[in-house]
Image (cartoon, grey):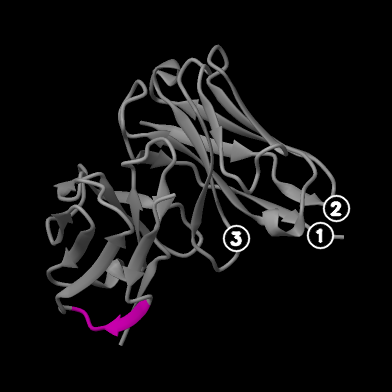
Amino acid sequence: AIRMTQSPSSFSASTGDRVTITCRASQGISSYLAWYQQKPGKAPKLLIYAASTLQSGVPSRFSGSGSGTDFTLTISCLQSEDFATYYCQQYYSYPLLTFGGGTKVEIK
Amino acid sequence: EVQLVESGGGLVQPGGSLRLSCAASGFTFSSYSMNWVRQAPGKGLEWVSYISSSSSTIYYADSVKGRFTISRDNAKNSLYLQMNSLRAEDTAVYYCARDRRGGSSTSCYGYWGQGTLVTVSS
């Protein structure tokens, strides 16, 4: 199975900060990488697919990049509603998808 | 509007059984592959099972293989997960999730239900 490793597992940031989350795959997955946002008690929400394509309705402050084994999610100007946990997911081995362990973004 | 609504969760004793349902609306259910994903309390997301649009292809995570059975009824726009021989480690919120793209093409999950909590405890 393809393993997905996210870093950091958590960090604190302030509103207005630029933040970057990293996701690494245990083998090359081309651009078959998605990012999800999850708030407490809620279902995950798709933010980005194909490594860099913004899902409809997602604010443009979110962006994704990378291919192969290394990927990043960037939030250009952190807003209060962005404090949440973020997960990467590979779908190269569809339908056997795997998730990263999550990155919790907390308020500093 | 796409809607996925899970039901059937609850408290069950170890070794017991439970059947989860996911009612779909707002899209052509028979055109999409579906999945179950779970999340243990305070933990990350774990894919559980996949079923293709016609039910011809089914996969399970190793952790549930032989104990869980996924199925769907396209006439009723419904997805199911029959869970047998439940263990404490199966305690989690169970989400149904729809592929972002129709058919059986390589896809991530475009829509998720709100989840249903399964607690396995004596």
Q: Earlier in the sequence, mark 2 or mark 3?
A: 2
Marks 2 and 3, Cα distance to the nearest angstrom? 17 Å
Q: In this picture, which residue range is highlighted in magenta? A: A10-15
The amino acid pointed to by label 2 is: Gln
User: Residue B13 — which label?
Assistant: 2
Q: Please count the marks in the image.
A: 3
Q: Is residue A13 found inside the magenta-colored segment of the image?
A: yes
Q: Is residue A34 found inside the magenta-colored segment of the image?
A: no
Residue B65 is situated, as x and y percent measured from the top left of the image, at: 65, 39
User: Residue B40 — which label?
Assistant: 3
* Residue A26 quadrant: bottom left
Q: What's the residue at 57%, 16% (across, down)?
A: B76
Residue A67 is situated, as x and y percent measured from the top left of the image, at: 16, 52
Report the side of B82 relative to B53 (left or right): right
SS of the residue under disc 3: loop
Marks 1 and 3, Cα distance to the nearest angstrom? 14 Å
Q: Residue furthest top?
A: B75
Q: Find disc 1 in the rendering and name its residue.
A: B121
Marks 2 and 1, Cα distance to the nearest angstrom? 5 Å
The amino acid pointed to by label 3 is: Ala
Residue A16 is situated, as x and y percent measured from the top left of the image, at: 15, 78
User: Residue A69 — which label?
Assistant: none
Q: Earlier in the sequence, mark 1 or mark 3?
A: 3
